[in-house]
Image (cartoon, helix red, strand yellow):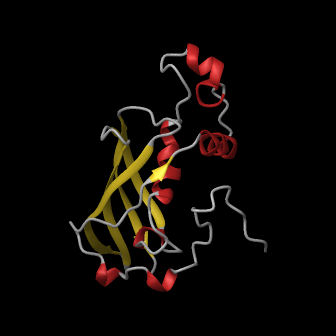
Amino acid sequence: MAQAQSPDPNFETDFWKDANLRKTWDEIVPGQPRQTIPYKLTQEAIALYCKAVGETNPLYLDEAAAKAGPFGGIIAPPAIHILLMFACTPANDWMRSPGTVNAGQSWSYNIPARPGDTITLQARALDKFIKRERLFVVHDNVFFNHNGEVICSGRGQTIRPM
């Protein structure tokens, strides 16, 4: 099977790459901040995300319509945090382990992300536990723009591979 090519050369699409470098269950320490990397959001990334999810709102795609809209220019859809989660997470982070399953999440949205924003992520595991022989991690994530404003924040649970 051919590997999909990412339009952003800094965004790795092979989640098995560096899998042996990721923290194991025993190495995940609740409360310890995760290493993250800044990501510069582009209009192209927003457009590619919209295409992938079938989003056609002109506030995200059409400069003229967006300028006339309530935000005065193109913004990213709120769910762009899905792209940002991986863009701001190094390939060797435990969150990117192959076989990880999303067991639920809740997000709050403050302000829209915009093209040109340099996004940073503050993230950590809050708790970990075993239930029915499954490894769960509860984690929180807060995304900021380059002005230090919170774009969105969320809490979720993942089931870790054994």
Residue for point 52% across, 74% down: 99
Residue situated furthest left in the rendering: 31
Residue situated furthest top in the rendering: 68
Q: Position of residue 100 (x, y in %)?
A: 48, 70
Q: Is residue 44 left or right of residue 147?
A: right
Report the front residue among 54 and 101: 54
- Disc tally is 0
The quarter of the rendered structure image containing the C terminus is bottom left
Q: Position of residue 5 (x, y in %)?
A: 72, 63
Q: Is residue 88 left or right of residue 1?
A: left
Residue for point 73% across, 70% down: 3
Q: Is residue 81 above or below residue 8?
A: above
Q: Is residue 154 above or below residue 98?
A: above
Q: Is residue 59 left or right of residue 29?
A: right
The quarter of the rendered structure image containing the N terminus is bottom right
Q: Is residue 2 above or below residue 120?
A: below
Task: Please identify the quarter of the rendering in which residue 35 is found.
Answer: bottom left
Q: Is residue 50 above or below residue 140?
A: above
Residue situated furthest bottom in the rendering: 20
Task: Please identify the quarter of the rendering in which residue 37 is found.
Answer: bottom left
Q: Position of residue 121 (x, y in %)?
A: 36, 53
Residue for point 57% across, 62% down: 10
Q: Is residue 20 left or right of residue 156?
A: right
Residue for point 50% across, 19% down: 72
Task: Please identify the quarter of the rendering in which residue 74 is found.
Answer: top right
